[in-house]
Amino acid sequence: MLRLLAWLSPAFPVGGFAYSGGLESAIVDGHIANRDDLSRWLRLLLADGGLRNDAILLVEGHRHSADEAALCAVLSLASALAGSAERHAEIVRQGEAFVTAARAWPHPVLETLTGSAIYSVAVGAVAAAHGVSVGDAIAAFLQAQVSQLISVAIRLSVIGQTQGVALIAEIEADILGSIDAIERMGGDDLGSASIIAETLSMRHETQYSRLFQS
């Protein structure tokens, strides 16, 4: 558990602070203007969008951690599913940074992940390699991702820190309520219904003024 907390801490050097996953474009285009808008947006990503897919890919990484060929296939699938150039850069750069930093806890699985590692898959594989349960890994990963997106909204002055903390507490139940179902999912369950979010992620690539890299 201490390792999981370290890996998904904001202090772990994966560079997550530099990315918004298209949230910056959603704010610039007026889709998100306040706390309630942000709450609905995050819940959509958890239930039907990119965060759900990331959690499923984490499960697949965890499931195939000890099978090099199967793990490589999951990494290739995750790479192919990136909806935009920025999104692909985001998950690869964070994945590579995660694997590099995780070498402080040596394990053979890190050799399989060397190269174009995908962040969510790498987290799942490394968690399994160190005996972390898939449920705990899902919970910690989703909470960290939601917290990062809330941090984006705070830095873009959509909400304040007090509202941000309240929103983290509010969405806690959504994350915990999704874990049992996600644990049983696999590649056939991947898919997204968050079309506007995906489109905004692509639009961010040509946005005139940007604070974030995605």
Image (cartoon, rainbow, N blue to C red):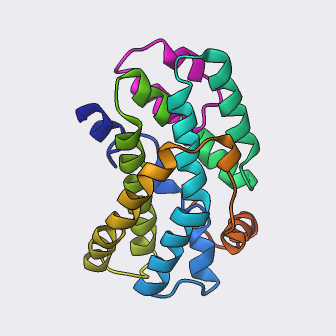
Can you say whether 147 is above or below 125 in the image? below
Image x and y of residue 200, in percent = 69, 71
Q: Quadrant of the N terminus?
A: top left
Please report the bounds of the magenta region as a residue range: 97-122
Side (left or right) of 81 relative to 21: right
Residue at x 60%, y 31% (from the top left corner): 117
Residue 96 visible: no
Residue 151 image-quadrant placement:
bottom left
Q: Nearer the viewer, residue 55 or 105?
A: 55
Image x and y of residue 202, in percent = 74, 64
Q: Nearer the viewer, residue 167 or 100?
A: 167
Image x and y of residue 88, in percent = 69, 47
Residue at x 45%, y 41% (from the top left corner): 14
Can you say whether 47 is above or below 10 in the image? below
Side (left or right) of 28 relative to 126: right
Side (left or right) of 182 relative to 171: right
Q: Quadrant of the C terminus?
A: bottom right
Residue at x 72%, y 71% (from the top left corner): 195
Is 36 in the magenta? Answer: no
Side (left or right) of 52 relative to 70: left
Residue at x 76%, y 42% (from the top left corner): 80
Image x and y of residue 127, in percent = 40, 30
Residue 41 visible: yes
Is 113 in the magenta? Answer: yes
